Image (tube, rainbow, N blue to C red):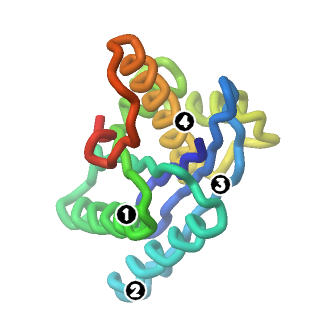
Amino acid sequence: MIVLGIDPGSRITGYGIVENVGNRLVHIDNGAIFTDAAADFPGRLKKIFDGLLEIIARYRPDQVAVENIFFAANPQSALKLGQARGAAIVAAVHSGLPVAEYSALQVKQAVVGQGKAEKEQVQKMLKALLGLPEIAQADASDALAVAICHINSYGLKQISAGRTGTKQHKTSWRDMKL
């Protein structure tokens, strides 16, 4: 399973692509989509949407995971962040991909084992888990962590379904919200 993790932002949207191969995590790519803060806001949203469509077309992920909003300094920032998240989610849904959403606490718990982990701890753990030559850019690191969180959560959900004898079926994006 190939997962595209997204850390949405109105100025910088991070992305990370991780493949689950057996019990291994394989880093495929990571990076960021940068928007011009001086540009009109609808144009910035279009750049996020178009950039993610290109990434989806290039890497053909099976699923997408997006970080939830957890903090905003002011209402205007929260609104812009929500709109950037919307552009990311619409790009995934437009491409026919299921979308899962995770809080920062869930992401840190999945990667480091502790929900209160510092950003540096998460980045170091990502470097070790994925065999990265260096620590990825901050927004890309966050996106890689979201992808790993989804892989771990999805795997646990599949194991749990197997134990209860539940018939396996294709999961819709509605089923994947945690």
Graded by Cα atoms within 10 Å as few (under 14), some (14 to 19) or many (20 or more), the crowding at tag 3 reads many
Residue identified by numbered label 4: 148
Q: CA distance from mark 3 to mark 4?
A: 13 Å
Residue designated by label 1: 93
Kindly indicate whether the residue at mark 2 contacts the one at mark 3 (C-beta within 8 angstroms). no
Type of the residue with mark 2: Gly
Q: Nearer the viewer, residue 14 or 170?
A: 170
Numbered label attached to residue 35: none
Q: Percent position (x, y) of residue 166?
A: 33, 21
In this rendering, is residue 19 above or below 46? above
The percent position of residue 73, horizontal first and vertical second, equals 26, 54
Which amino acid type corresponds to the residue marked 3 in the rendered image? Answer: Asn
Precedes in sequence: disc 3 or disc 2? 3
Q: In the image, what residue occupies the spot 58% across and 63% down?
A: 32
Q: Quadrant of the C terminus?
A: top left
User: Residue at point 35% right, 15% down?
Assistant: 165
Of mark 2 and mark 1, the one earlier in the sequence is: 2
Callouts 1 and 4 close, C-beta under 8 Å: no
| Residue 134 visible from this viewpoint | yes
Q: Nearer the viewer, mark 4 or mark 2?
A: 4
Q: Which mark is residue 30?
A: 3
Give the secondary structure at mark 4: helix
Q: Is residue 45 left or right of residue 50?
A: left
- Residue 43: which numbered mark, if any? 2
Asked whether the beta carbons under mark 3 and mark 1 sit within 8 Å of each other, the answer is no
Of the pair 40 and 161, the residue shown nearer to us: 161
Q: Is residue 117 visible?
A: no
- Spatial CA span between label 4 and label 2: 30 Å
* Residue at figure coordinates x 49%, y 76% from the top left: 35
Mark 2 crowdedness (10 Å alpha carbons): few <14, some 14-19, many ≥20: few
Q: Earlier in the sequence, mark 4 or mark 2?
A: 2
* In this rendering, the label closer to the viewer, 2 or 1: 1
